[in-house]
Structure formats: C-alpha cells, structure tokens
Amino acid sequence: MSDQPGTSQPKNPLHGLTLEAIVTALVEYYGWEELGQQVNIRCFTEDPSIKSSLKFLRKTPWAREKVESLYLYVQRKQAKSKKEGPDGV
C-alpha cells in the first residue's frame, strides 16, 4: 500500500469533499445562528459568510477539525434517521 498523494482514500468519509461543500451543508442544516452555537467561532457568529468562514478555517486547523467533526456527526445522524424511517422505527 502506498501513501503517495493522489491515491484513493476509500475509508476517509471526507475524501472528495471541499471545505466549501462542508460549510454550505452545515449552514443549510443548522443556519448561521445555530452553527455558531455548535462551533463557537467568530466567523460563524459575527457577520457570517461562506467566504469569510472558508478563509478562517483554511488558516486554523483546530477550527477546521471541529467543523469537519460536526459535519460527520450530521451525516451519521441523517443516515440513521433515513434508516429508521419517518416514524422513528
């Protein structure tokens, strides 16, 4: 197995997703206000925008990790609710 850049990452659930797609999905799911409560960073609470959030997250690894973790949590939650069906069974 090779660790060369550009090789497939089949077990990485974020592989192929852009940071913009992740932030956009979270904004659609939570809205800016709730997203700012989930991940308390200024780019989500003070005059939020996709552009300013991307700029901050690209420079700040700890914040990006929090956002990616929240995205994975939301994806698991949505997959579980689809599996259970509309009445929770």
Image (spheres, rainbow, N blue to C red):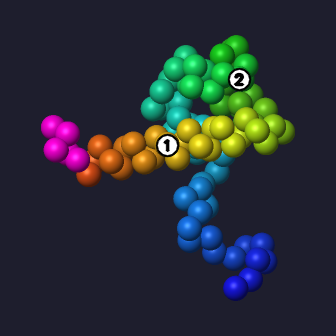
Q: Residue at x 73, y 35 (%)?
A: 63
Nearest to the observer: residue 60 or residue 6: 60
Relative to 37, say whether 67 is above or below. Answer: below
Nearest to the observer: residue 58 or residue 1: 1
Which quadrant holds the C terminus?
A: top left
x and y percent of residue 39 in the render?
A: 63, 27
Q: Secondary structure at mark 2?
A: loop
- Residue reaching furthest to the front: 89
Which label's residue is closer to the chain start, 1 or 2? 2
> Which residue was labeled with disc 1?
73
- In reply to whether residue 30 is colored magenta, the answer given is no
Residue type for callout 2 = Ile
- Residue reaching furthest to the bottom: 1
Which span of residues is magenta-colored?
Answer: 84-89
Mark 1 to mark 2: distance in Å?
Answer: 18 Å
Q: Residue at x 20, y 39 (%)?
A: 88
Determine crowd level at label 1: few under 14, some 14-19, many 20+ residues with C-alpha closer than 10 A: few
> Which residue was labeled with disc 2?
41
